Image: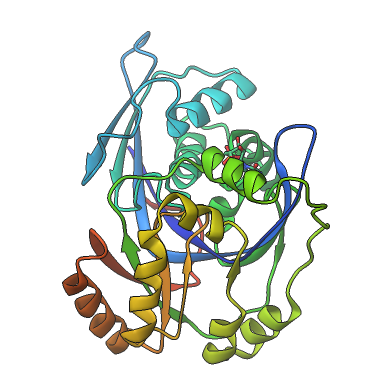
Amino acid sequence: MISVRVPAKVNLQLSIGPLRPDGFHELVTVFHAVDLSDVVHVRTAAPGSGITVEVTGRDVADVPLDDSNLAVRAVALLAKTCDVSSDVHITIEKLIPVAGGMAGGSADAAGALVAADALLGTRLKRSELDALAAQLGSDVPFALHGGTMIGTGRGEQLTPVLASGSFHWVFALADGGLSTPAVYAEFDRLHAGERIPQPGADERLLFALRSGDIRALGSALSNDLQPAAIAMRPELGRLIESALELGAISGIVSGSGPTCAFLVWDSESALDLAVALTSTGLCRDVRRASGPVPGARIITS
Ligand code: C5P
């Protein structure tokens, strides 16, 4: 059996550009991997059994167990590309919120790619894994790499960002997920008739990351999908306001939501905010995490 740990992400900047003819939006984002991780285990199964998957953890009822599961798709794509048997059983230990805007499904796809590559002996080059990852989803290449990176194109083209220090976060989880396509569709509706310019990387954010300046990072966080997510879930706006009153340096909707990410000074203030947020009743659960952390890594074989 091979086991791979793979992190969730938060977008420190998510700037959405024009809708492309292929249905994706051109974007510029700054991805940041945090130590809130899923673990993907793969093992060979009986000949002819195909690819099977089981998922353990809280709130996993919404994770599909058929061919649409991103980890299953990752193993199938790898096996087809390399012309090897795909009799593989996948077990996903889920900690990353499902449909939460933290790229949990993409993480599982990246984890399954790395794990199956080792299990099946396909030994793909990093660039080949990247190409398969990009076919699986816009956020999958980042889950392979981790760290802090600028994503361009539809998010799959990555450039490393110089970042010093470690940042502490509190993530507030909501009841039920938000569909990423639905949030992008709401973004399109909110901006109907507008000419959306080509976005660029935010120099203030890049400087804050380079210098490790937490306060500057807090004031540079941005997410163009936030108004769309709040339009669909107005309670997220109230949650962010409360967290700021309770001492968060800054707060944003994570990706397409509904998870919200709150930047705090250190692990102690993370614990304080987590406790205080829990008692507001505005979120279902809270998680503390720090970043940046590396992407998909084999932990046992
Ligand atoms: O690439 P991924 O499968 O994660 O994308 C899910 C959906 O999110 C896409 O089908 C699309 O509706 C939306 N999306 C987008 N522009 C992007 C990334 C995702 O419109 N750059």
Residue at 54% from the left image edge and 19% from the top image edge: 84
Residue 102: quadrant of the picture: bottom left
Residue at 45% from the left image edge and 54% from the top image edge: 257
Up the image or down, 89 lies above or below 246; here it is above
Q: Which quadrant of the render holds ligand 1?
A: top right
Residue 209: quadrant of the picture: bottom right
Q: Is residue 296 visible?
A: no
* Left or right: 103 in relation to 200: left
In the rendered image, residue 300, in percent from the top left (x then y), is placed at 34, 50
Up the image or down, 230 lies above or below 213; here it is above
Residue most toward the top?
48
Q: Nearer the viewer, residue 197 or 213?
A: 197
Residue at 59% from the left image edge and 19% from the top image edge: 80
In the rendered image, residue 123, in percent from the top left (x then y), is placed at 59, 37
Up the image or down, 150 lies above or below 247; here it is above
Residue most toward the front?
193
Count the marks: how many? 0
Q: Is residue 265 visible?
A: yes
